[in-house]
Amino acid sequence: MQENVLLQMRQIEKSFPGVRALGGVDFTLRKGEIHALMGENGAGKSTLIKILTGVYHMDSGEVRVEGEKVSIHSPQDAQNKGISTVYQEITLCPNITVAENMFIGREKGIWINHKEREKRADEILGKLGIPARAKQQLGSCSLAVQQMVAIARAVDMQCKVLILDEPTSSLDDKEVKMLFDLMRDLKSRGVGIIFVTHFLEQVYEVSDRITVLRNGELVGEYLTEELPQVELVSKMIGKELEELSSMGEGDDKNAEAGEIFYEAEGLSSSETYPFNFNIRKGEVNGFTGLLGSGRSESVRAIFGADKVGGGSVKIKGKPVKITKPIDAMKNGIGYLAEDRKRDGIIAELSVRENIILALQVMNGMFKPISRSEAEAFADEYIKVLNIKTASRETPVGSLSGGNQQKVILARWLLTHPDYLILDEPTRGIDVGTKLEIQKLVLKLAEEGVSVTFISSEVEEMLRTCSRLIVMRDKHIVGELKGSDLNQTQVMKTIAGGEA
Amino acid sequence: MKNGKRNIFKGGLGQLTIPIVSICLLLLFNLIKGLITKDLSFFSIELVRNNFGNMVLSGNLISIINGASELAVLAMGMTLVTAACGGQDISVGAAAAIAGSMFVKVVKTGSSISGMKVLLAFLAACMIACLFAAFNGTLVAVFKIQPMIATLILYTCGRSIAYWINGGATPTVSSPIISGIGSFIPGVPIPTPVIIVVVMAIIFKLVFHFTSIELFTQSVGINGSAARLNGINSTFIKLLSFIILGVCVAVAGTIGVSRLGLINHETLLLDVEMDTILAVAIGGNSLGGGKFKISGSIIGAYVIQTLTITLYAMKVSSTDVKAFKAIVIIILVVIGSPVVKTWFGKFVGKYFKKNKQLAVKGAE
Amino acid sequence: MKKYLSLLLVGVLAVACMFTGCAGGGGKKGGAIKVGVVNNPPSESGYREANVKDMEAVFSAENGYELKTAYSLKNDEQLQAAQGFITEGVDYLLISAAETTGWDEVLKKAKEAGIKVYLFDRMIDVDTSLYEAAVVSDMAKEGDTAVQWLLSQNLPEYNVIHIQGAMGSDAQIGRTGALDAQFAAGTMNKVVQQTATWDEAEAKKIVETVINSGESFNVIYAENDGMAKGAVAALDEAGITHGVDGDVIVMGFDCNKWALRELLAGNWNYDGQCSPFQAQIISDLIKGNKTTSEKKIINEEKGFDAKTLTQSDIDTYGLGE
């Protein structure tokens, strides 16, 4: 058993100003295993990975690779020691060929033998069964294949430890399967794989062992087959998960709530075809469909985020014109955008400033929210939404993903919207926060707020929405409610005739 | 609460560390040099009677804060443009020449020079400066042209425009009111440009207090897309930053021509744009936009002026001054770079590790 | 036979030349002499502005000229303009070149076309046969005149603040030379010698620093009027008297009207002329009112002493308004 150990991290500690990210964490990776690293956002997963890859330097503790104590100074250093990482966001260059991507930065000297290189690239791709050709431009491959090329690059660099950080978050089911096949193949070749993900099912599908972290502490290491899913979740969030089961599906309390709040007829933007849509006061509905089906574009059209094409919009029966976000905001609409980093947070500004931003915009430039008022608002929402931050003055960019999402939620809640649009509010965040957000949505609906909810996870939408608008190829193809609201029916509608 | 306050303080000083340390180092250098040569005249401030019979302050330190006035005023506006647009306006020198020319032109119309007319002249200068700023701003905010490229146009032709306004030559004006603006007001020993800088700084502070321009500007600069989706009109914010810079340009131009009562379109505030951008950078502001501190830029302006006067006091030939300036600035910028900052942070971290750990434990 | 033929040919050619010459000069405008002026743009400096105005005034229709002008700071644009004038067929080409090189070709063409070339203000590196005459200032002489005047003041000692123009410019080199010789000879002490690159504000800073250092000085020698004005502002703020009966002698160059007025008021002591008025001399040469055997004609330049300056001097010699 002992000689089987590939990587051992012991008593790893790491603090950042005001926050202890890791307090004495152990982690062991064996040869030929897929080891899932689990935990909520802020549990310390990324910190641990970054220490292992030389991005951060640990305060204390030791790292052994194949029994030998090592110190890792930089990502380059980590690679030299056989530790490679494939990140969530693809870090290769899309405008050069696959082969060039695989060998970039690895040539010794300045002479490059293109033929030799392409031959070698094709060899590796073939061996790993990756459907790409060496001469192809990387950008012309699908995201999954690009990710695989990144893995192939790592494999070719004689890596012993392969770290996959959220590799599946932008892949579809088929692509995920391809990736898993590749992972199993590598496993059989004796590579140790550390797999970081938020998708529980995937963990159970592919991993052998699970290490759970919580609040920078080690909760434990488990064999996957011996740890039921519910137990895993409760270990991650640190409490029994009665709430999870108690949240019954098909909660249709809000089904036929009050009068129609928002109504659009023939609404279109530069990104959508004309469509009709309405939502009642206190209703929760959702747009569903595959990525690229036009669900995000539709809600963006409602909010006036893209150039408006045409159509008429009524709010509480009165015609209004919404051509830009501020119009929507003035009409009581809030919009939490899909891409948190690009369209949500103002990373370098503090939690406080991020929270008051939307309200401040609505108040106008000449009615600034006073410092003390802003601090009170921030403190209130930090408490209500349980935002984990060192202080309200911490730059929001340094928070974990889930907490950033909560900050943006707080921003919109502070405007007391009548209608809140949440586009993928739970993507890339941990189970605990996901639940909190779902509960919050239901609570808002009870208070009379209309909510449109978009999520890639259908169960999540089934749990919260009383009506689902299904989209395919930028068109609305169905509307489901009542007894039709179940997984099979949703899938059928999404897939259309072929199902 | 306490924690929050401490962080504000830490954060605030964080950005201002570089400019404050720089200015201290320069003064320390002069102090040591003074002690060695037993000549501390660099630091002496005297009250002397000037040729117009006023008691005024004089000395190198006064020269520094006085001489840096135009630079400080321009740096305030430039900070805002930098923050909102992620780029710099390189036409401020030329625009100041235009504003100064306009100022002199209006002052010189008619025979007598009254306070009313000077005020009118200043407003005219403001108007023309804002007009050109709006032109720059439109190119940047509406047509999304890189600020440096957009302002290159005015940089190139601005001094010719100033020449047309002047109608040639170097018009001069002399009036106690003009010298009151550019030099001293009778009975006030402090140079008027210094007072103007203070007034401008207070105006900025008030504007930031009574509006949310600061928050909006930073939001637009850091993440334009998110700002837009939060209802901020980023085009307007960018344009506004240019207009505010335009007012600063008019003020700087007015100070510049009032100092000598003369407008030379070729030399007024020549090369000031580069010093201005440097002041913003030394002030710890990112030239890529986003978070900013006006106070940093103001101190940055004084750093540059201290450096210049120090070199002059050492009788470094002014042709060589530029080279020395470059060397010192390279050092400052490198010290301020993230690489050195992290390195320094680690260095400090090593020595205070124990302390820190205790603090963290205490916090828990 | 051949001999006669070739003579005839020469004769025809000569007549043709004369005819075209007359047509160019006489033609439509009734005997106006066509003059093409290639100059730097008036926006270059107060000097240039006066220079351009002077050209326009002298080569006017009333004086029997037809004037064409081209202004550029760039040599290649100037060359093109000159080429254009040759093609148009002017009678005289007047050039103040941006650079001293690159003019061979064009001037040869002008000569072939029978166009007479005068240089003004600036010399060009070409064979002297390619132009009739060059009317220029002698900057070194301007410096000499100024320094001779300064020596004639018979001060017990000379402690000079020397503020230079943009390093390497003709004016700077010429006006610095004479003073440097005095520094070298030890007749005058150099308190500080700095370039302010023609910048008034910079000149003020330089003088301010000297005042702050406590060093004593009694002469400010600034290489143009603007810098002298900057220097004086520093003196005023420090309460140091200057000008006639003052502690510090103030010297400037260029003879702007406003500067001469300072002299008249006794605030400054000396202003050296840098005459932009070459047009009359050239006009005299063209019309034959004046002849010269010298290729290089030095424009007469004066130095004005505050004690002897009169209002009429200002009206006659002052530049600008």
Image (cartoon, grey):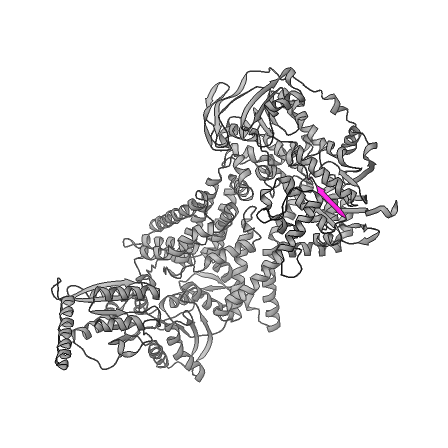
Residue A145 relative to residue A365: left or right: right
The quarter of the image holding the N terminus of chain A is top right
Q: Nearer the viewer, residue C127 or A314?
A: C127
Classify residue B160 by image quadrant: bottom left
Would residue B118 be visible to someone looking at this image?
yes
Residue at the extreme bottom of the image, as rendered: C185
Q: Is residue B83 left or right of residue A42?
A: left
* Nearer to me, C19 or A426: C19
The C terminus of chain A lies in quadrant: top right
Q: Is residue C153 left or right of residue B214?
A: left
- Does residue C163 lie above or below B294 as drawn? below
Residue C294 percent coordinates (x, y) = 25, 81
Q: Which residues are magenta?
A: A159-167
Question: Is residue C119 visible in this depiction of the protein?
Answer: no
Percent coordinates x, y for residue A190 in the rendering: 79, 45
The outermost residue toward the right is A1
Task: Determine whether, in the image, residue C91 is placed left or right of residue B55.
Answer: left
In this rendering, the answer to whether A80 lies above or below C292 is: above
Is residue A163 a member of the stretch shown in magenta? yes
Please tell me in which quadrant of the rendered image residue C307 appears.
Answer: bottom left
- Give percent across and percent down for residue B128: 37, 49
Q: Position of residue A166 (x, y in %)?
A: 69, 39
| Magenta stretch: includes residue B248 | no
How many labels, in total? 0
